[in-house]
Each structure stands twice: as structure tokens, then as C-alpha cells.
Amino acid sequence: MNATGNAAGSAAGSAPEGAASNARFSFAGATAVVTGGTRGIGAAISAALLEAGARVHATYQGNEAAARAFADRAAAHGGRLVLDRFDVADAAAVERFWEGLETERVSILVNNAGLRRDGIVGTLKAADWDRVIATNLSGSFHMSKFAVRHMLRARYGRIVFVTSPAASHGFAGQANYSASKAGQVGLMRSLAREVAKKKITANCVSPGFVDTDLVADLAEDVRREHLASVPLGRFGEPAEIAYAVLALCAREASYVNGAVLEVSGGL
Ligand SMILES: NC(=O)c1ccc[n+]([C@@H]2O[C@H](COP(=O)([O-])OP(=O)(O)OC[C@H]3O[C@@H](n4cnc5c(N)ncnc54)[C@H](OP(=O)(O)O)[C@@H]3O)[C@@H](O)[C@H]2O)c1
């Protein structure tokens, strides 16, 4: 990928594996919102956008220590990072957040916040079903609803959902997670049709296995099994997912709409 112009950049070229952070884009002057933007994949997306010159609202739910640590690491970016704490599943909190952005012009939303509460269907607690759907799917809806209203004013926007191969493959013990991720794809595809004429695009990035806190509790045999299924023979790095997200957020990605970009090492 070698975007130019407003989203100027050069590809990593012959960069070695894991060197995705060498990719260069320019989002100078742009304002982005990244949910779950202070840890894991979201932190890598926030960091890449900051590095590319954007002002970034990185949201999180409650892990203050991780948010502070991320802000410390991003201190070099001249105050372009803003931390916002709220639950994406709380529609009223999401509305208040967007009301606070009235004077800003947000052109990028990355629906990245997500969690797992695994269990096989026969014994899965209703509360765990509800929490995962409320966060991963309804949270994406609440955020997108207000983002679209905001972006319509400028008649421009980029909305990216971080979904999962679980959406199409399904994983045993993850019915709630898989349903929430499949729901994100359906939401994205409808949204992509609704707002395309206003030059707002909606797409998904679907990461394979990426070493973050989200998968830290996987049993060793499950990890080995997952690893064996990845043709590239390794888990992904958060920066490698961020690279794909930035590519879809570039102004030049103007004809990519309603797409799911799998970044999974060939899973
Ligand atoms: N890691 C993988 O292998 C993988 C694979 C495919 C897809 N994904 C997807 O990628 C996304 C990021 O995953 P990750 O691995 O980076 O996870 P992670 O390290 O666990 O980070 C999750 C982030 O989401 C935030 N969050 C969770 N629930 C929230 C809520 N209700 N409201 C607001 N923020 C909330 C967390 O905030 P706090 O820090 O405050 O808790 C944290 O910043 C998720 O959507 C996940 O489903 C991950």
C-alpha cells in the first residue's frame, strides 16, 4: 500500500515481519475517535494515528492505569491525545461524549472496544451473552449513530469496525462473541449503503490472533491449536492491525466501502 497526497505514505517495502509501524501515513489536521484506544489493538491504532499527525480521542471503560501508561507513551505527540472514559454500551454516555465534540470535526471513528465472556451455549449465562452483545455490537451502533450525524455536517467520514474471523467461522465457546462480531459486519454493511452518497465509508478490519490482554487467558493447548491454524505461523502484532485500519481511514480509500479486510496471517 502506498498512499499519497493527504494520506501520503510509503509502504514498508522490504520491511521485515512485524515492522508495520514503519508504515507512514499523514492524517495531519484530522480528528479521530478510537474506542478501546488505550490498550491492545486500540492503543496501536491510536499510536499510529498520532504518529501520522491526527488528534486522537482514545476512549476506554475503566482501566485507568493502562490509560495513564498509554498517555505517558504518547506524550511526545504534543497534546494531540485526549482520553475519554465511558462505557460504549451506555447509550446516554455515548451521546454525552459526542455532545462534547460539538466544536470538533471528527472524520474518523474506529469501533474497536470489545470484550469476551466465553462459555458454551448450553451453560452460557444470560448476563454474559448480554454484556458481550451490548459492548461489541450495541456499543458500535451507539458510536456509529452519533458519528454519522457528526460526519454528515462535513459530508465526509471514515468508520472502521474491528470485527473478528469468529463472525464467519464461529468458535466453540464463543457464541456470544461470534454473534456480536457477525452483527458488526451486518451493521457495517447497512451503514455503508446508507451514507455512501455523503462520502462517508464504513468497513471492517478482521484481525486474526493478536497477542493482547484479550487472549491472555487462553489455555496453552488452545493457543497451540490456534497457532497451528495460521499459515504465517505466528500471532499478529497490534501494529500490523493498525496499519490496515489506517489504510481504510486514508482519504484515498474512497472506493473501499462495505468491505471486510481480514488481517489474519492467512487464517
Ligand atoms: N486480540 C485478538 O486476537 C483479536 C482478534 C480479533 C478481533 N479482536 C478485536 O479487537 C478489538 C480490540 O481487542 P484487544 O485484543 O485489543 O482487546 P483488549 O486488549 O482487551 O482491549 C480492549 C479495549 O476495549 C476497551 N473496552 C472494553 N469494553 C469496553 C466498554 N464497554 N466501553 C468502552 N471501552 C471498552 C477496554 O477499555 P479498558 O482498558 O478501560 O478496560 C480496552 O481499551 C476487540 O473488538 C476484539 O474483539 C481482537
Image (cartoon, grey):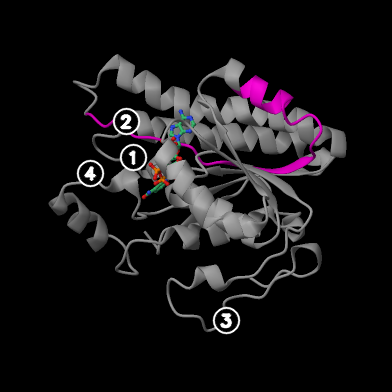
Question: Residue 254 location in percent, x, y?
Answer: 76, 54
**Separation of marks 2 and 3 at Cα, in angstroms:** 39 Å
* Eye-nearest disc, 4 or 3: 4
Closer to the camera in the image, 78 or 209: 78
- Identify the residue position indicated by label 3 in the image: 13
Is the residue marked 2 within 8 Å of ligand 1, measured from its CB? Answer: no
Ligand 1 image-quadrant field = top left
Q: Which residues are magenta?
A: 94-119
Residue 175 numbered tag: 2
- Disc with the residue nearer the chain's start (2 vs 1): 1
**Separation of marks 1 and 4 at Cα, in angstroms:** 19 Å
- Identify the residue position indicated by label 4 in the image: 217
Residue placed at 21% from the left, 46% from the top?
A: 218
Q: Is residue 180 left or right of residue 190?
A: left
Closer to the camera in the image, 64 or 218: 64
Residue 249 lies in magenta, yes or no? no
